[in-house]
Amino acid sequence: MVEIFAEGVIKSMDAVTQHEFPWEKFEQKAKNLGFLQMGWAELSPTDNSGVERYRQWLSQNHHGEMEYLKRHLPIKENPELLKLGLKSAFVFSFPYFPHPAPLESLADSENPLRIALYAQGEDYHHWLQAKLEDIQKDLQLEYPGEIFLSATDSKPVLERDLAHRAGLGWFGKNTCLIDRKHGSLFLIGEVLTSLELTKKMEISADFCGTCTRCIDICPTEALEEPRRLNANKCISYLTIESPTSPPENLRSKMGDWFFGCDLCQTVCPWNQKIFKEKLEVLPTRSLTLEQKQELTEELRLILKLSGKQLLRKYSGSPLSRAGHRGLRRNAMLVIANQKIHGLNTEIETWLSDEKLGELAKWTLAQL
Ligand code: B12
Ligand code: SF4
Ligand code: SF4
């Protein structure tokens, strides 16, 4: 059988079904690269309840304006549509606290802005992808006739669902995948393959018990039920993915988060146990006079730099994903919620902006 890759490469697919995969060798390789865990999962399991839950989530419009998630539904339902002959995924977890590729300028110790932990360094779509490609290369050498394709948040697959079925953790009530030994401050990556594997993975039990700390702390009540997050209300969505300004009723609840949010994870006892007192759980930080001054100057810069300069400042980090308008939007929300005075002139320059004008007016009214 011959299959054609999306890129146009032709690959022979006289499938070699592999039953004796050298797990120890590859687990060691993954460990040497810094991965926490490695497992595997079928791409089209008989029980596809993960996709069913995803379908329901979309139908409730909990994806906000992330339209690509809707477009990906047919492939998530039926990976055969990728036409690559992919059958399984090797799934990996990689910790982001402490950050493995830190950018000093974004670290809490250096930067007065409140930035989610995963974003305080280089973009994982680059550094994690490179590590996955390293494993992909070795897999390809081991099985020259098979297909391997590495990805992290870049292919239409349900990564938490895959990781759960690969035995890497349980779905916490905050929707994050959690492992008893490693907590939840890890990213998920995979190498998709035409190999069909047989090793039985041990699915993690649910260790949330009666705890509801994540639901209780969420300032915007985005966790509407255990394991159901409405992205329209999530600070992470509102400061990273959303192309617009948040609805007025949520703005003052967003605290001082400039990019992303970690509260429902930092409050989690499974992370608290591992990282002890290092995790911050305040919805809004209280600042010394000096910290407030530093924050004011950083926010001034964000409102004053040109779009190009601003994107250059954050190039290579996840912050560039918000775009320059998104970053200015986030700056105004922080100004309003931390009651930062002395930036009125900078805010006024945005009053006539088509996208930011209304928020600029609201921000001035809060001060
Ligand atoms: C869209 C998206 C977001 C959205 C929506 C998040 C959400 N919870 O749905 C927003 C922008 C809000 C977001 C925020 C964050 N994200 Co995000 N995001 C994604 C993305 C691209 C898709 C997720 C998705 O499909 N959501 C839709 C829901 C329905 O699916 P789900 O979250 O996977 O939920 C499954 C379970 O909850 C499960 N489920 C629900 N109920 C039940 C009940 C039972 C019994 C069972 C068994 C299962 C179950 O079924 C669902 C479907 O399979 C993935 C990457 C990917 N390609 O998968 C990253 C991803 C989920 N994000 C990630 C991260 C790190 C974050 C943030 C921590 C970043 C930050 N600090 O700001 C926050 C965490 C917020 C949170 N509490 O989820 C990681 C998560 C790693 C982990 N340990 O879980 C991922 C996997 C990216 C990666 N490659 O590592 N994200
Ligand atoms: S990331 Fe923040 S806003 Fe989003 S669900 Fe968790 S606590 Fe709520
Ligand atoms: S805070 Fe509690 S309920 Fe939420 S994910 Fe952690 S253990 Fe589960």
Image (tube, grey):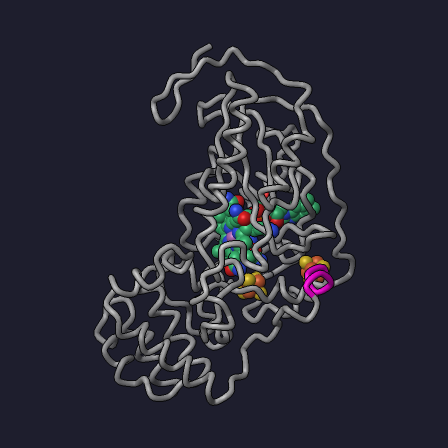
Kindly indicate the quadrant of the structure image that contains residue 38.
Answer: top right
- Nearer the observer, 54 or 281: 281
- The residue range painted magenta reads 270-275
One can see residue 322 in this view: yes
> Does 98 appear in magenta?
no
Tell me residue 262's x, y (percent).
56, 64
One can see residue 53 in this view: no
Q: Is residue 36 left or right of residue 75?
A: right
Outermost front residue: 32
Kindly indicate the quadrant of the structure image that contains residue 35.
Answer: top right
- Nearer the observer, 282 or 113: 113
Q: Kindly report the secondary structure that dominates the magenta region of the rendered protein.
A: helix
Q: Is residue 232 left or right of residue 34?
A: left
Tell me residue 71's x, y (percent).
41, 40
Q: Residue at x 47, y 47 (%)?
A: 127
Q: Residue at x 73, y 52 (%)?
A: 181
Q: Residue at x 44, y 53 (%)?
A: 123
- Nearer the observer, 314 or 162: 314
Q: How many badges with numbers are in the image? A: 0
When the figure is inspected, residue 240 is found, relative to residue 359, above or below; the finding is: above
When the figure is inspected, residue 13 is found, relative to residue 181, above or below; the finding is: above
> Does 273 appear in magenta?
yes
Q: Is residue 294 left or right of residue 194?
A: left
Quadrant for ligand 2 reads: bottom right
Tell me residue 301's x, y (percent).
31, 75
Q: Residue at x 46, y 38 (%)?
A: 155
